[in-house]
Image: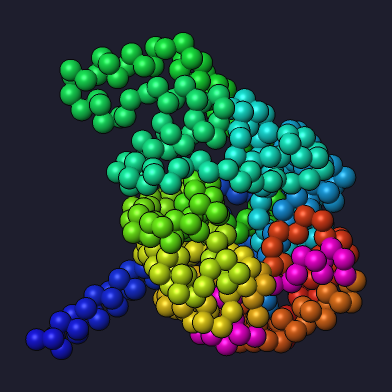
């Protein structure tokens, strides 16, 4: 009986895997079909399709015509255009022009888009307190800076676990948006389950300061929509010129939801020792929410690649045992949930993922994920993950900022010779570039196109 059960389980896994492959192919077909794009020339249309095919083959561990190049520019396009991050966040037309010119000039296969330069006015309207940004706590020519403050207290795990949405609306949002502090006066949505409870629930929305908070939220929403409409015009123009954006949406690892902006680094590290069961329970509660977030985020874009930055999983922040116990299990479930829907988790492994860390993350379906490594040994990454996942990276941003073009060329050649062997590799910087020398970035892209050819 045990053998029969194992056989049935194996058949079920194969069926699920087959279904996910079918869904993934449909997602790539949607991206490839370029519906709604009027290409500026037949050459641009061919280039667009070639670039998507190149990336698709690399992700699926096939051998493309050459190694694709991904440009994760950060605020580099703004600096390259001679404007500050503040200007990019304030003047949406200058933002769009800077990113468009950057892509047309450097011509990567795929790029990260301009979502890093978010609408400054919307943050100002809401008095956003979670980050500092250009001329709002930090110099106008610099990027963001996260403010290390606990926005969820150590004794609030139960509130998060019992009703995450209620916790975020009535507790978390009032703490990170100064204007939304009146939301603390609202009652839970569950108070609307029956007519006797409706009236006291609605009264809270009539309180003047609550009404003002909603008016501010509407104003911020209008500003965000204005930003989106302008940026979309420039993204469409780049599509028409033959350049696709790589990512279609994003989500987070459950541990990072807690450790980044709720408990903070110090808080989550203490909680792992003082109340580990609560940490684990909260992360399990977040799995379906983070999976849904990734799925829903790609619905409007039609691009299957889901961006997942790993902020707290590196070897410098936790041991292998902690990674296996706290970080990886729930992240893996999110990854598998996305894969089941035909999506491609694009996992940014910040810091170093070496030795046993690589062996741990190898436990995923073959040819369904893309891992971009920052400070990881790419020889080891290729050896351990080469038959399981596409890997990307890891040209150091320090090298791109301070090195010489010839040094960049030497580094890229080593990457291509090792990580690029037999496909399954995308050339990219190890992190967002921001202040790179233009000649160094150009060398990374152009040398890869020249040397990283498979079919000569």
- Residue 268 appearing in the image: yes
Pinpoint residue 262: horizontal percent, then vertical percent. Answer: 49, 46
Q: Residue furthest front?
A: 274
386 above or below 310? below
Q: Is residue 317 magenta?
A: no
**x then y, percent, for residue 289:** 38, 50
Eyeballing the image, is 89 above or below 11? above
The answer to whether residue 446 is seen in the rendering is no
Instruction: Name the residue at 45% across, 74% down.
Output: 321
Q: Which residues are magenta?
A: 379-403
Question: What residue is drawn where x is 71% and y is 81%?
Answer: 415
Count of numbered labels shown in the rendering:
0
Find residue 359 and report its horizontal and vertical position in percent: 49, 82
Residue 63 in the image: above or below residue 282: below
Quarter in which the C terminus is drawn:
bottom right
Residue 386 forms part of the magenta stretch: yes
Residue 85's image quarter? top right
Q: Quadrant of residue 307?
A: bottom right
- The x, y position of residue 21, in whole percent, is 39, 71
């Amino acid at each position: 009986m045990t053998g029969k059960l194992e056989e049935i389980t194996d058949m079920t896994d194969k069926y699920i895997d087959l279904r996910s492959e079918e869904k993934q192919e449909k997602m790539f077909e949607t991206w490839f079909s370029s519906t709604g794009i009027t290409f500026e020339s037949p050459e641009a249309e061919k280039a667009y399709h070639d670039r998507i095919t190149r990336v698709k083959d690399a992700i699926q561990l096939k051998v493309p015509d050459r190694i694709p190049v991904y440009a994760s520019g950060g605020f580099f396009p703004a600096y390259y255009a001679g404007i500050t991050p503040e200007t990019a966040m304030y003047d949406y037309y200058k933002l769009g022009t800077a990113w468009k010119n950057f892509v047309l000039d450097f011509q990567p296969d795929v790029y990260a888009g301009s979502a890093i330069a978010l609408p400054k006015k919307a943050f100002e309207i809401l008095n956003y307190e979670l980050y500092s940004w250009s001329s709002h706590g930090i110099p106008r020519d610099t990027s963001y800076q996260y403010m290390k403050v606990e926005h969820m207290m150590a004794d609030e795990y139960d509130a998060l676990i019992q009703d995450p949405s209620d916790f975020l609306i009535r507790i978390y949002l009032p703490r990170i948006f100064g204007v939304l502090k009146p939301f603390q006066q609202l009652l839970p949505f569950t108070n609307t389950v029956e007519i006797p409870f409706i009236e006291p629930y609605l009264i809270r929305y009539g309180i003047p300061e609550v009404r003002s908070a909603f008016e501010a939220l509407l104003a911020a929403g209008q500003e965000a929509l204005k930003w989106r409409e302008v940026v979309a015009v420039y993204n469409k123009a780049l599509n028409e010129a033959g350049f696709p954006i790589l990512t279609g949406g994003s989500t987070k690892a459950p541990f990072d939801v807690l450790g980044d902006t709720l408990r903070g680094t110090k808080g989550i590290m203490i909680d792992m020792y003082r109340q580990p069961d609560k940490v684990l329970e909260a992360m399990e509660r977040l799995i379906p929410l983070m999976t849904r977030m990734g799925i829903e985020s790609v619905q409007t874009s039609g691009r299957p690649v889901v961006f997942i930055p790993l902020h707290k999983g590196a070897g410098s922040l936790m041991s292998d045992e902690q990674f296996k116990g706290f970080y990886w299990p729930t992240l893996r479930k999110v990854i598998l949930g996305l894969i089941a829907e035909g999506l491609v988790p694009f996992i940014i492994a910040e810091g170093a993922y070496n030795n046993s860390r690589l062996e741990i993350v190898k436990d995923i379906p073959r040819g369904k994920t893309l891992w971009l490594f920052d400070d990881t040994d790419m020889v080891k990454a290729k050896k351990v993950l080469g038959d399981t996942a596409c890997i990307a990276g890891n040209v150091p941003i320090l090298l791109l900022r301070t090195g010489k073009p010839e040094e960049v060329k030497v580094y890229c050649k080593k990457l291509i010779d090792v990580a690029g062997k037999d496909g399954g590799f995308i050339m990219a910087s190890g992190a967002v570039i921001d202040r790179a020398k233009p000649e160094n970035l150009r060398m990374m892209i152009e040398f890869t196109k020249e040397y990283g050819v498979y079919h000569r």
